[in-house]
Amino acid sequence: MDKSKRRSSNTSGNDTETIVQKECLLSVSKTCAINKDLFAACNSTSEVSSIAPTISSTTFSGSINSSSKNSLEIKNGTNGPKTKKKVHEFDLFAVVLLVFCAISGSGVLATPQFVYSYTGNAAVSLLIWSGYGIMALLGALCYIELGITFPVGGGEYMYLNEAFGALPAFLYQWGSFIFVPAVNSELGLVASQYLVAPHVDDIHCPSSQRATRLLAVSFILILSYINCVDPKITERFNKGLTICKLGIMGSMIFCGVNFAVNQGLLTNENFAIRPQPDPQVIELREYDVAKIVRAVYQVGYTYHGLSHLYLLVENVENPQRCLPRGVAIAVPLVIIMYLSVNFMYFVTLDKATILSTQAIANEMFKKVFPSENWIILSWVLPTIIAISVVGTISVRILMCSRINLVGARNKQCPKFLSLVDRKHSTPILSIILQALLAILWALFGSVRLNIGLSIYTEGGFTLAVMYGLIYMRITRPLIPRPLKIPLFVPIVYALVLTSLHVSPFFTLDAAALYERFTLMGGAVAVILTGVPVYFILVRRKTNYGWLSRLNNDSTVFLQKTFNLVTEEQFHQD
């Protein structure tokens, strides 16, 4: 009897082992079939049909299991070793440096003279810089909530898509495709001006302008190549440039304080209050309000880089921890630095110098250091300043290249923009495309034009995102929000931004209003050209065979030329 029981138990155990072995073999065969199909898709000259719009939610039954949003765990066989293919992630220190470098670009080196030209008084200028710094903190809180609630790449593109649908998100992508390279070119021109200005008599002469533009093109090409090579090298490069920027800003503050102690703080004419004759009080008051509004616009441009961090939120290590802490450390540091550097400008330089210079930091160092030492420092200091600006270009290239990548995931861009580097998951084609457009802006644009266009486009989309946050709070209150700020914060921030956009129409004179309409109208017209593009090409009801063939053939050609893969294939290699 016992023998028969043992025999039956052994038989059932063998049957169980047989079933498990069959399931394992079936799992292995499925994995082999998947890898075979992927290999055929990579090497076929036919249409590339394996490009998936969404990667983070992709899971395979059997031997491939999703272990995180950025990695896939692969088991070889039944008891084989586990391997992970993981994209590069940013820790807290990297987030702090990214936020600091993205915000503190050329703003404190290129806009103080414009702000001062509108205010005419150093105290009013500093008040505007500090006031908008407080607004930047409110905006940072709003973006933290959005970034943690929707922890996917794409930043404002994804937030507009969640709030208002596909068309506003596509218009943001369309505007970013055109105007983000304009900002990169503006940064390159500012860095070039700091290198060229000490060695020429007139920065506005044609030969100096050509040298400045060609140098800006060189910066764009070199930095785009570095971002294409390896994200780890890019991160080390950006960290070094950000530390260099902190060093140069610290030296500017130290030199300014030393000069102020020796010469006296408020004896400069920049702090004098302008008298206003009684018969013209009303006219001057209206004129000053318009000027102050334009000055606030110039200061607002210097804080716009904050939103670009959320383009990389899916690459941030533990976003619920790193995003709030990184922003809480970096944004106050930027505000303190802006106020300190501007104060040093006003203490060391006279009004005529501030309004006439193209490289205000160079003029400050020239005033602080003795003339015999400036011969040597005229080569060193402008180079360090230019390097600090170059770091912001590199960070913007790293962040903004993800906009087209996320758009291609949602099938709102050509397929080839969803291809990434086989080794590091870098969107190489998006970086190359942005570099080509930035070169065109650098050759044919100007610093003031590029700043004006970026103010209206980025400010308008930021306002749309704030209203989207308020709208989702009302219409979708049950969304899980790990961090929920008080509702009055986005409301106040949105109302202030709205007043800044509306008030110039009631305060500007005819000439200034025409200039504003020219810039704003041009930016809006370019963005609205995306509407017919969206309905004809993205949401088309007619299947254009020639367009599909062109899309597939170009994707195959670029995939083979640059040795690229889809994001899905990257995680499975």
Image (cartoon, rainbow, N blue to C red):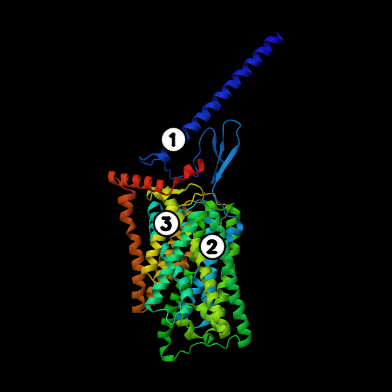
Residue 473 visible in the shown view: no
First in residue order: circle 1 vs circle 3 = 1
Q: Pointer 3: residues within 10 angstroms few (<14), some, or many (20+)?
A: some
Q: Which residue is mark 1?
A: 37
* Tag of residue 140: 2
The residue positioned 35% from the left and 74% from the top of the image is: 515
Number of residues whose C-alpha sits closer than 10 Å to that of mark 1, classed few (under 14), some (14–19) or many (20 or more) = few
Q: Is residue 542 above or below residue 519?
A: above
Whole-percent x, y for residue 366 in the image: 54, 82
Front one among 318 and 276: 318
Q: Where in the figure is residue 525, as x and y percent of width and height?
A: 33, 63
- What kind of residue is marked 1? Asp
Question: Residue 571 placed where, x, y %?
Answer: 51, 43
Answer with mark 3 or mark 2, whichever residue precedes in sequence.
Answer: 2
Quadrant the N terminus occupies: top right
Q: Pointer 3: what residue? A: 432
How far separated are the C-alphas under marks 2 and 1? Answer: 45 Å
